[in-house]
Amino acid sequence: MRKYVIFGVQGSGKGTQATMLARDFDLVHISVGDIFRWHVQNHTKLGAYVRRTVAAGELVNDDHVESVVQDRLHQHDWNYGFVIDGFPRNRRQAEFFLESYDIDGVIHLDLPDGEVRRRVLARRLCSRCGLDYNLMAHRPKKEGRCDVCGGELVAREDDTEEALAERLRIYHEKTDPVLDLFRRKEYVVTVDARPDKQTIQTEIRKRLDLPLS
Ligand code: AMP
């Protein structure tokens, strides 16, 4: 059983790296941001509140976060373990998590703020199937259309200059201290998030003593 947390500022490739790790080691990839986006898209009661919060670049309140994480982990469909992305984002969430779960490692994807801005503002999402694009690194064949389903590509509502500035500020204020807390327990491997995705994945596996393929 392997239980990992993946950390990184928005645009650092957390989702991509978590997906690659999950696929090869039969882990369940839990993305708290994706769960919240699901609530927004499906117009749940929680979704209405989350939508306003996320669009402003703010964090969803801890009670809601803890309840969605708990519900997800209580499904116990993670026989071989999980990789959780986007959580914990502050000290209270970290304490809540560590009370209930032992973790095997924390992957920290390190990316300078200037590069975050460049990447995030170029990020697009298919409005139909949810596939990720990036106007610099992963361009669609036909402008504005998804290669797979032909859906319209849109920016995430929280990928604006203002919301990004707020998210970066909150990340450094609230999430950096969580990393320090995990560092004290010697869980953290910090990996440079600037190379291509395969190089990053290989480095993560080396650092976690996982088989390379
Ligand atoms: P992400 O896809 O991880 O960037 O998450 C998108 C948005 O969901 C964030 O900007 C937050 O508003 C919210 N969110 C995701 N995870 C958390 C969390 N652990 N705590 C609070 N808010 C969160």
Image (tube, rainbow, N blue to C red):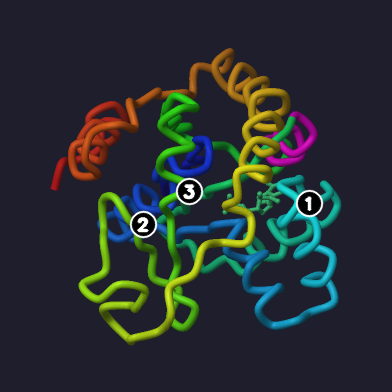
The amino acid on which the numbered mark 1 sits, given as a three-letter code, is Val
Question: Disc 3 designates what residue?
Answer: 121
In the image, is 58 to the left or to the right of 198? right
The segment highlighted magenta reads: 91-98
Circle 2 Cα neighbour tier, 10 Å, few/some/many (<14 / 14–19 / ≥20): some
Comparing labels 3 and 2, the label whose residue is closer to the camera: 3
Q: Nearer the viewer, residue 119 or 142?
A: 142
Q: Is mark 1 within 8 Å of ligand 1?
A: yes
Q: Residue at x 34, y 78 (%)?
A: 145
In the image, is 73 to the left or to the right of 14? right
Between the C-alphas of marks 3 and 2, the distance is 22 Å
Q: Nearer the viewer, residue 186 or 139?
A: 139
Circle 1 Cα neighbour tier, 10 Å, few/some/many (<14 / 14–19 / ≥20): some
Residue 42 is situated, as x and y percent measured from the top left of the image, at 69, 82
Q: Residue at x 45, y 61 (%)?
A: 28
Residue 100 is situated, as x and y percent measured from the top left of the image, at 70, 43
Question: Disc 2 designates what residue?
Answer: 19
Question: Disc 1 designates what residue?
Answer: 60
The image quarter in which residue 171 lies: top right
